[in-house]
Amino acid sequence: MIDWFSDWFITATTRRRYEILDRRVFDGGFVQQHVLYATGHAGQSISMRVCIVIRLDITGLIDRIDEYFDPPEIAPLID
């Protein structure tokens, strides 16, 4: 997620949890599929399928994170 979205999401929710569905390691990183469950301040809830691609640098530290999800799934937190 880009920084402003991450900041907004943390502020807009009171609880968050992840259910990891799959994780595949490849040379230089890994791909993970998970469901993100979150609850907003007014009690609204979401469950959002997410895919992240993590790339590691030569020292094994995270160099890049690409995250993919369907934006309409966060609508209950905005309405």
Image (spheres, grey):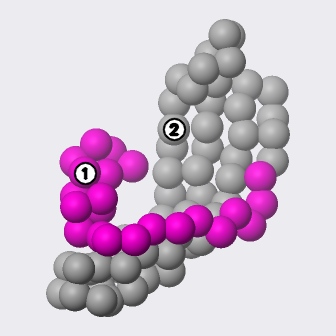
Say whether marks 1 and 2 touch (CB < 8 Å).
no
Please give the name of the residue rendered at 53% of the width and 67% of the height, measured from the top-left corner: 17
Residue under label 1, please give it.
Answer: 7
Q: Which range of residues does the magenta coloring cover?
A: 1-23
- Residue 75's place in the image compared with 50, above or below, is below
Q: Residues within 10 Å of mark 2 (few under 14, many from 20)?
A: some
Q: Nearer the viewer, mark 1 or mark 2?
A: 1
- Can residue 26 be seen at all in this image of the molecule? yes
SS of the residue at dot 1?
A: helix
**Residue type of the residue flagged with mark 1:** Asp
Q: Residue 18 location, x and y as percent? A: 58, 65
Q: Residue 40 location, x and y as percent? A: 29, 79
Residue under label 2, please give it.
Answer: 65
Please give the name of the residue rendered at 77% of the width and 60% of the height, measured from the top-left corner: 22
**Residue type of the residue flagged with mark 2:** Ile
Q: Earlier in the sequence, mark 1 or mark 2?
A: 1
SS of the residue at dot 2?
A: strand
- Residue 6's place in the image compared with 34, above or below, is above
Q: Residue 16 location, x and y as percent? A: 45, 68
Q: Quadrant of the C terminus?
A: bottom left
Is residue 40 located in the magenta-colored stretch of the structure?
Answer: no
Spatial distance from mark 1 to mark 2, Cα to Cα?
A: 16 Å
Question: Which numbered marker is on residue 54?
Answer: none
Q: Is residue 55 left or right of residue 24?
A: left
Please give the name of the residue rendered at 62% of the width and 30% of the height, measured from the top-left corner: 55
- Residue 71's place in the image compared with 10, above or below, is below
Instruction: Specify the quadrant of the image occupied by residue 20.
Output: bottom right
Is residue 22 located in the magenta-colored stretch of the structure?
Answer: yes
Q: Residue 73 location, x and y as percent? A: 40, 79
Q: Residue furthest left?
A: 79
Q: Nearer the viewer, residue 50 or 9?
A: 9
